[in-house]
Image (cartoon, grey):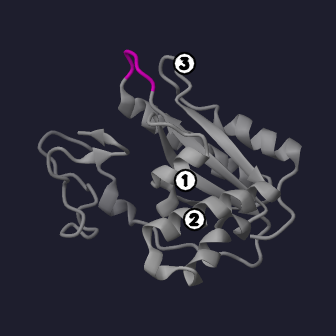
Amino acid sequence: LKAPGPSEDEIETSLHAAFRVPDHGKMCPWYALVFEGNARAEIGDVIADAYCAANPQSCPEQAERERGRFLRAPLVIALVSRMRTGKKPLWEQILSAGAAGQNLSLATHALGYGVQWVTEWYAYDETVKAAMGLDQRDHIAGFFYIGTCDDVQKDRERPDLSKVVSRWHAGGALANGDCYDSEKHDFPKAGFDIGGLKV
């Protein structure tokens, strides 16, 4: 993804669209960090330092690759899911952040830009998150790399609807996606973790 990236007005339009999502209880369980210009290099230094601290045997060679992470696009937006206490379920707050991510992606595509939604290891690194200003309530829903596409992007294989969509009736079998690596992606054991939440 190369320059040009979205203008300030286009960024604002995309973010307005992103946060026009279901938000049970008006809890605002998300926010965004915009990285552009030199800020991308500054956070790159943080990412490289965190990587080297965790993987001293891989540095300094790998450090430069890590340092350039946010330079892969002219604009990077971090979407943060923030857990808030109250009567509304945390699960719904997480879903709201996911909806915001999808809206952000669709809105930016609609403006004619390429978007890559990723997390990567540094989305879960406490040192990197702290340097960004996040605290224990915050989980990175994704980094959105945004810019002008270099070439036509190939779509990946998508699920066969017959494997994931059912016309429900009592006693009927469900097309629940178990055909996709059911051995590898079986139901999580009790006490599994969803973004820091024990279920």
Label 1 vs 3, first from the N-terminus: 3
In the displayed image of the protein, which residue is found farthest to the bottom?
Answer: 61
Label 1 vs 2, first from the N-terminus: 2
- Give SS at disc 3: loop
Tell me which residue sits at (26%, 55%) in the image: 176
Query: What's under tag 3, amino acid-wise?
Result: Lys
Query: What's under tag 2, amino acid-wise?
Result: Asp
- Residues in magenta? 84-88
Q: Quadrant of the N terminus?
A: bottom right
Position of residue 32 relative to residue 77, above or below, is above
Q: Nearer the viewer, residue 46 or 78?
A: 46
Label 2 vs 3, first from the N-terminus: 3
Question: Which residue was labeled with disc 1?
Answer: 128
Assess disc 2: are there few (<14), some (14-19) or many (≥20) residues with their C-alpha within 10 Å of its C-alpha: many
Q: Is residue 153 magenta?
A: no
- Residue 175: image location, x then y, percent: 26, 56
Looking at the image, residue 70 sits to the left or right of residue 188; the answer is right
Q: Quadrant of the C terminus?
A: top left
Question: Which residue was labeled with disc 2?
Answer: 49
